[in-house]
Image (spheres, grey):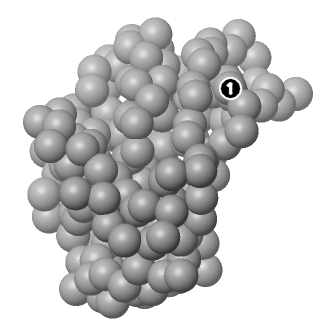
């Protein structure tokens, strides 16, 4: 089963996958879709507040953050990592519970990325916002690093996330019943 939708003027067919016995979600995978990455980045930047640096979490939204930084004329952006790396010193961390991942995860920032965020207006970006827990976790890291949240953006907001006043999203992604019909 698929859900066809228009995103930033581009039509995509998104495959449906069950998250429990009653609910399915449409999988929006930006990996490998250069046209969508470039177009969505431009559309988000058109609606973005003033900011100094971008931040996202590993992994699906990395191409989006890269493209937004490139189009904004910036030379860097920050990625909250899902695992500690040997080169990450004096790291800070927080937990995140995403509905598309089977277990609780952690997000980490090392001292180099912490320095990039300190005292700066940070635009937090993601590909899809579902429960908003990934955004909450990234915002927590920004605050721990001494940065200020300039705004939170995503290409798609799933279900009721589109109603949140603290998030800017290009389109609403519906939730689906087990039979593939849209939940109202």
Where the C terminus falls, by quadrant?
A: bottom left
Q: Does residue 115 appear to the left or right of 167 in the view shown?
A: right
The image shows residue 34 at horizontal and vertical percentages of: 50, 83
The image shows residue 144 at horizontal and vertical percentages of: 46, 10
Q: Nearer the viewer, residue 88 or 162?
A: 162
Q: Does residue 14 appear to the left or right of 45 in the view shown?
A: right
Residue at the (51%, 51%) spot, across then down:
22
Residue 73 position by quadrant: bottom left
Residue with the most extreme right position: 86
Residue 54 vertical placement versus 67 (above, below) = above
The image shows residue 56 at horizontal and vertical percentages of: 48, 43
Residue at the (43%, 61%) spot, across then down:
177
Q: Nearer the viewer, residue 77 or 178?
A: 178
Residue at the (22%, 86%) spot, across then down:
9
Residue 42 vertical placement versus 55 (above, below) = below
> From where the camera sits, is residue 129 visible?
yes
Q: Nearer the viewer, residue 68 or 82?
A: 82
Residue at the (67%, 35%) spot, across then down:
81
Q: Does residue 151 appear to the left or right of 31 in the view shown?
A: left
Q: Which residue is mark 1?
A: 104
The image shows residue 150 at horizontal and vertical percentages of: 22, 32
Q: Secondary structure at mark 1?
A: loop
């Amino acid at each position: 089963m698929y859900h066809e939708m228009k995103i930033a003027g581009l039509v995509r067919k998104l495959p449906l996958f069950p998250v429990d016995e009653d609910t399915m979600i449409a999988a929006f995978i930006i990996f490998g879709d250069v046209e969508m990455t470039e177009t969505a980045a431009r559309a988000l930047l058109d609606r973005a507040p003033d900011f100094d640096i971008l931040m996202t979490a590993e992994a699906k939204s990395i191409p989006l953050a890269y493209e937004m930084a490139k189009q904004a004329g910036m030379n860097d952006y920050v990625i909250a990592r899902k695992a500690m790396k040997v080169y990450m010193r004096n790291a800070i961390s927080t937990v995140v519970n995403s509905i598309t991942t089977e277990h609780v995860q952690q997000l980490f920032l090392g001292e180099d990325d912490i320095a990039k965020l300190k005292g700066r207006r940070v635009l937090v970006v993601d590909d899809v916002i579902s429960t908003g827990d990934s955004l909450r976790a990234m915002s927590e890291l920004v605050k721990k690093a001494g940065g200020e949240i300039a705004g939170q953006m995503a290409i798609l907001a799933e279900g009721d996330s589109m109603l949140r006043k603290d998030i800017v999203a290009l389109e609403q992604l519906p939730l689906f019943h087990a039979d593939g019909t849209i939940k109202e």
